[in-house]
Image (cartoon, rainbow, N blue to C red):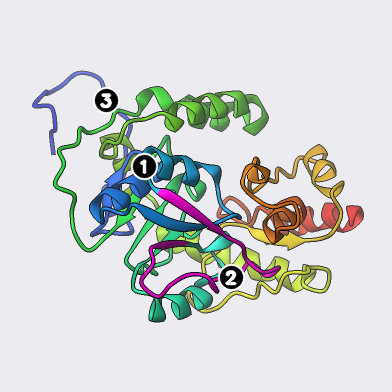
Amino acid sequence: MNTYNEYGGFFQLELGRGTTYHSEAIYLNSARNALKYIIRLYKIRKIAVPYFTCPVVWQALKDENCDIVFYDCDLNMNPNLAKIGRDDFFIVNDYFGVMSEKIDEIISYYPNVIIDNAQAFFSYNCGLAAFYSPRKFFGLPDGGVAVTSDRLNESLDVDVSYLRCLHLLKRHDMGASASYTDFCDADKIIDSLPMRYMSRMTKNLMSGIDYDFIKNQRIKNYNYMHKKLSDVNLLNVTLSVNDTPMAYPLLIENKNIKNRLIQNKIYVATYWPNLEDVSPADSNALYLRDYILPLPIDQRYDIKDIDAMLKIIESII
């Protein structure tokens, strides 16, 4: 479709002509705005969230004037809901995309649970509502997804993304290290975006993704890595049939491993910085933050790549 009623001239990028994965969802310009959309839609004024979550979640809730109550999880990332009432609003995370069975149990009992699927793009678990961060799974300039039973009666503009694409293009030509600063710059911009619908560019990029290949490759790589590392992993993270992982969460009680992996060009993130701002010193959230190594198992890699990573990992641990 010719969106701009312009004909001839130079060509644009050849983007996808397929469909997006969550076809009935609301496509917005960031995951935090997807969460804000949900809060506004259901007029939520008080909500419980885990200590072990991205600080962006706290900020989004504060921006929407929500009272926040925190809860902890156990050492296998299962939420401790002892103080959550059956009809309370609360957020549960599908950590690393490996928690679908536990979330199924929670949804079956609690009617007002919101699922943070930022790390579980392929999950259809929704509860009352769910929100997603597709940038954690695919090379996109921005974007967030909200799955709800209704629509917000609020007029939103469509965002524009071309100024947030430099790190994606640069990585193709020059690699991750050379484009990391550009990635951080784009991330800061996304932090402050007003709520808008997803840009045409981002949505078209999403319609060109081979979702089946990506899902299958992630599962294959994860299971192979788990077979090799399960004996040393303090987490029980065997995939269930509905799990599609973001990363392989390896829990080892050694804070020095992460820096050594990064020195060997295995880039592992910290989930999440600044948790101590709200978490008690003895919380399980801080322990999990300090000792989980989220190892890459995504669609960019095959079994030879996983073997190469495992060789480095095994030499370090």
Secondary structure mostly taken by the magenta-highlighted segment of the chain: loop
Task: Identify the image quadrant of the N terminus.
Answer: top left
* Looking at the image, residue 98 lies above or below residue 51: below
* Looking at the image, residue 137 lies above or below residue 167: below
- Residue extending farthest to the top is 9
Q: Of helix, strand and loop, which one carries label 3?
A: loop
Is residue 49 covered in magenta?
A: no
Q: Kindly identify which residue carries mark 1.
A: 65
Question: Of label 3 and label 1, which has the lower sequence position?
Answer: 3
Residues shaded magenta: 67-91
Label 3 and label 1: CA atoms lie apart by 45 Å
Q: Of helix, strand and loop, which one carries label 2?
A: loop
**Kind of residue at badge 1:** Asn
Is residue 72 covered in magenta?
A: yes
Question: Of label 2 and label 1, which has the lower sequence position?
Answer: 1
- Near-viewer residue (56 or 220): 56
Crowd around label 2: few <14 · some 14–19 · many ≥20 (10 Å) = few
Label 3 and label 2: CA atoms lie apart by 54 Å
Mark 3 vs 2: CB contact within 8 A: no
Q: Kindly identify which residue carries mark 2.
A: 80
In-image side of 197 versus 278 (left or right):
left
Residue at the spot 66% in from the left edge and 61% down from the top edge:
248
- Near-viewer residue (162 or 37): 37
